[in-house]
Image (spheres, helix red, strand yellow):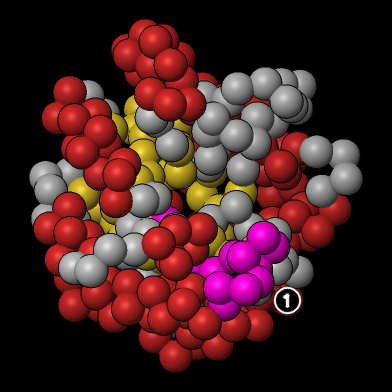
Amino acid sequence: MGIFDTHAHYLKRDFGGDLDEILSRLPQNNVERVLTIACGLDEYEETKDILRRYDYICGAFGVHPEFADTLPVGWEKTLESALKTEKAVALGEIGLDYHYGAETKNVQREVFEKQLILAKKLDLPVIIHSRDACEDTMKLLREYKPRGVMHCFSYSAEIAKEVVKIGMYVGFTGVLTFKNAKKAAEACAVTPIERLLLETDCPYMAPEPHRGERCDSSMIAFTAAKMGEIKGVSADEMIEIANKNGRRLFFGEI
């Protein structure tokens, strides 16, 4: 069983002219499945095209908190329509980000809550982005108790435990391999292995020894090695376990 990258961003603006070359060769590098994320309305059509052209790629559509204060009238209908696309398996990436957007807190919370409600309506898992917004994020997750994953987890081990208690999964990117990622390692250690997901967040977050380079889904092998070390299994075993976890969450496979 190969790699399931449960969080990637494959867009021409980030990968340029070699995007199709990269996507064509990933299956040759032990990448079995990729979930590519459309974070803003202007990314939806390009993402739909990728889903049509690559059998192994599935998609998620949502409104990232970065775009919460620039949404046009009727955005909810555009999102709901995109989520009915064939091979759309999740609503995301959604959430709260107060790192750069503290002045838009109120509209971020409003847009986030509307999307949590929509996910319930459509019975879809959610992909959560949360940065410097732990308290407000957890308040809404406790209220709505969605199926889904806390992506690129960056909070404490105690919060990881609570995320799992709510019924969600915890995703880790290449950041887990960084020498200063003590908090991420602690959170990974306390998360049950059946609730862990492997992600790239590519083209960002490349793991060591490729930190700072443009990332792609094949690099998950390095994150899997670190995650396996923390959990006491081999890299190959971790890839297989995380693949099964992703299939359980996004496809309902047992």
User: Residue 136, percent across and down?
Assistant: 59, 83
Placement of the N terminus among the 4 image quadrants: top left
The stretch drawn in magenta includes residue 178: no
How many marks do you count on the picture? 1
Give left or right: position of 87 versus 105. left
- Inspect the image, locate mark 1, and give the three-letter code of the amino acid beneath it: Glu
User: Residue 92, percent across and down?
Assistant: 37, 58
Residue lying farthest to the bottom in this orientation = 143
User: Residue 191, percent across and down?
Assistant: 64, 63
The stretch drawn in magenta includes residue 100: yes
Mark 1 lies on a secondary structure that is helix
In the image shown, does 188 or 47 lie closer to the viewer? 47
Q: Residue at x 58, y 25 (%)?
A: 215
Give left or right: position of 131 versus 167. right
Q: Residue at x 41, y 81 (%)?
A: 110
Which corner quadrant of the image does residue 206 belong to?
top right
Residues packed near mark 1 inside 10 Å, few (<14), some (14 to 19) or many (20 plus): few
Q: Residue at x 34, y 33 (%)?
A: 33
In the image shown, does 205 or 111 lie closer to the viewer? 111
Seen in the picture, residue 18 relative to 99 is either above or below; the reply is above
Placement of the C terminus among the 4 image quadrants: bottom left
Magenta region: which residues? 93-105
Residue lying farthest to the right in this orientation = 180
Seen in the picture, residue 157 relative to 178 is either above or below; the reply is below
Residue 247 seen from this side:
no
Give left or right: position of 18 versus 58. right
Give left or right: position of 207 versus 12. right
Q: Residue at x 36, y 39 (%)?
A: 36
Residue 14 seen from this side:
yes
Mark 1 — residue? 158
